[in-house]
Amino acid sequence: MSNLDGLGYSGKTCVVTGGASGMGEQVARILGELGAKVYIVDIAQPKVTNAGFYPCDLSDFDAVRATAEALKALAPIHFLFPCAGLPPMVKGPAYCMRVNYIGTRLFVESLLPALENGAGIALISSDAAMGWQKNLAQSLEMLAIFDPDEAYAWCEADPEKRIRDGYTTSKEMLVVWVANAAVKLGLERRIRLNAIGPCPTRTAFMDVQETALPDGFLDEWPYPSLGRIATAEDQAWPLILLNSPLNAAITGTFLYTDQGFATGVFTGAIDPAFMSGSKR
């Protein structure tokens, strides 16, 4: 991929969480092909070529801190891709919140001292977070809690309201955190922080999540731009492009990579009634 050297990854140090499978695996693979030195953080051994593997469970906050501390030896880190995430049916909604938002935020904030000024951070939210504005007041309340144990205790104090299904809420929190934290990071260190919002994507993650969906649900999902369910590589590319230094003016952004689903719903071009089963 020498013709893509202008993206700015050749010879750069990149850290990818969730790089052993799904979108994270494809991000790690493509970065390696672009000439980056890729270090993977995951609970599972990665299959793609990498410069180093750091086993870590993001639900274990002490392990997160220790892993971030070990990664500081790589400084300066030029690009960070927090791709790790899981659906609630794996270990429940609370665990989902613990990994997807609290552990991910802790990992990024713990690693910030090792990031180069002007570094890029691009993570994966979801178009499940498309309604984040209506829950903003509660999200800002949680956002103000910096200690991960306190944040988790706050969630557990009212799980029906503060955790809900675990997945939607955690992905909304990522969007709010990105939008808020990007301002200070940009002003103080020129670090950019962005997120993508994928639609259903064919990964091992979706294979698990699909078990909780009605039969044929994904077949009926609107796929206006691809005409099919997206692949992990389809999602990896926009994440990599978004994090490229060529996009110097883009930060605090939630980029829908969902084949036009969210904006189609917002404008009435797509009827969301199929999600409740009323259109089957």
Image (cartoon, helix red, strand yellow):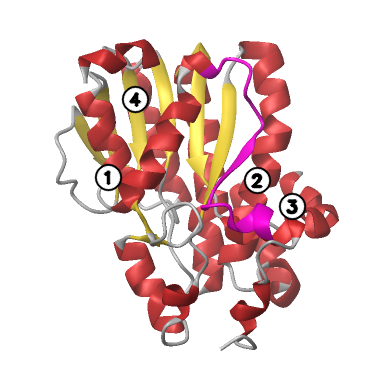
- Residue denoted by label 3: 142
Could you tell me which quadrant the C terminus lies in?
bottom right
| Residue at the spot 51% in from the left edge and 52% down from the top edge | 259
Between the residue at mark 3 and the residue at mark 4, the CA separation in whole angstroms equals 29 Å
Tell me where residue 101 appears, x and y as whole percent: 56, 51
Which of disc 1 and disc 4 is earlier in sequence?
Answer: 4
Tell me where residue 266 appears, x and y as whole percent: 74, 57
Q: Is residue 236 left or right of residue 253?
A: left
Depth check, front residue: 140 or 144? 140
Which amino acid does the dot numbered 1 rest on?
Answer: Glu
Q: Measured along the vertical axis of the image, is residue 40 above or below residue 23? A: above
- Disc marking residue 224: none
Depth check, front residue: 153 or 190? 190
- Is residue 93 covered in magenta? no
Q: Are marks 4 and 1 in contact (CB under 8 Å)?
A: no
Which of disc 2 and disc 4 is earlier in sequence?
Answer: 4
- Residue denoted by label 2: 175
Q: Is residue 211 left or right of residue 132?
A: left
Given this view, does label 4 or label 1 mark the residue nearer the observer? 1
Q: Secondary structure at mark 1?
A: helix
Q: Count residues near mark 1 (Cα–Cα under 10 Å), then give few for <14, some for 14-19, many for 20+.
A: many
Extreme-right residue of the structure:
137
- Residue denoted by label 4: 14
Q: Count residues near mark 3 (Cα–Cα under 10 Å), then give few for <14, some for 14-19, many for 20+.
A: some
- Residue denoted by label 1: 25
Which amino acid does the dot numbered 3 rest on?
Answer: Met
Which of disc 4 and disc 3 is earlier in sequence?
Answer: 4
| Residue at the spot 58% in from the left edge and 52% down from the top edge | 260
Which of disc 1 and disc 3 is earlier in sequence?
Answer: 1
